[in-house]
Structure formats: C-alpha cells, structure tokens
Image (spheres, helix red, strand yellow):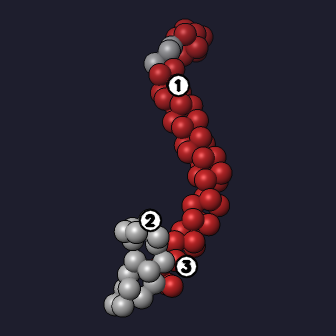
C-alpha cells in the first residue's frame, strides 16, 4: 500500500495537463480583460457610424455629408 502511494506521489504524468490548463485560463482571462476595455469604445464608434448612416439619403446625394470625397 505504501509503495502504491509513493508511486502516486512521484508520478509526473499530469504535470503537462496542469500547465496547459493554467496557460489556457490565462489566455481566456486576458481575452476577457481586453474585451472589457475595448467594448465601450467599439460601442461608441458603432453608434456614431449608425448615426451618420441614418442622416444620409442614398437616393438623392450619397456623398453630401462627406467633404473628403467631393472634388473641389
């Protein structure tokens, strides 16, 4: 019985699995942190784009609001 317990203590077969689990958890955590930081800016930008698109009448003058695309 003690021999079985000593072999279990000395075994390193699960060490690689633990390393992968820790690294994967760190990558997932980093991804969630980046998403939390960036999401407010992306939401604000998408609202600005939606507002601009709602003000353009594509049938009459699609480039009226954008002076960069109009030749002088």
Mark 1 vs mark 2: give the one in front.
2
Is 59 on the left-hand or right-hand side of 40?
Answer: left
Question: What secondary structure is marked by label 1?
Answer: helix
Q: In which quarter of the image is the N terminus?
A: top right
Q: Mark 2 Cα within 10 Å, few/some/many (few <14, many 20+)?
A: few
Kindly tell me whether residue 63 is visible in this rendering: yes
Q: Which residue is drawn at 38% across and 85% down?
A: 61
Q: Residue at x 47, y 70 (%)?
A: 67
How many circles with numbers are drawn on the protein? Answer: 3
Mark 3 vs mark 1: give the one in front.
3
Kindly tell me whether residue 25 is visible in this rendering: no
Is 25 on the left-hand or right-hand side of 69?
Answer: right
Q: Which of 64 and 4 is in front in this view?
A: 64
Mark 3 vs mark 2: give the one in front.
2
Q: Which residue lies furthest to the front in this view?
A: 72
Vertical placement of residue 67 versus 57, above or below: above
Q: Distance between the residues labelled 3 and 2?
A: 18 Å
Is 69 on the left-hand or right-hand side of 21?
Answer: left
Q: Which residue is drawn at 46% across and 18% down?
A: 13
Quarter holding residue 56: bottom left
Question: What secondary structure is marked by label 3?
Answer: helix
Q: Which of 9 and 30 is in front in this view?
A: 30
Residue wearing tag 1: 19
Question: What secondary structure is marked by label 2?
Answer: loop
Q: Distance between the residues labelled 1 and 2?
A: 53 Å
Residue wearing tag 2: 68
Q: Distance between the residues labelled 3 and 1?
A: 47 Å
Where residue 69 appears, x then y in whole percent?
Answer: 39, 68
Residue wearing tag 3: 51
């Amino acid at each position: 019985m003690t021999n079985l317990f000593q072999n279990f203590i000395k075994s390193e077969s699960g060490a690689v699995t633990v390393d992968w689990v820790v690294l994967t958890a760190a990558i997932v955590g980093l991804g969630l942190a980046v998403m939390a930081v960036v999401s407010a800016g992306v939401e604000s930008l998408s609202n600005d784009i939606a507002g601009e698109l709602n003000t353009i009448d594509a049938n009459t003058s699609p480039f009226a609001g954008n002076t960069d695309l109009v030749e002088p």
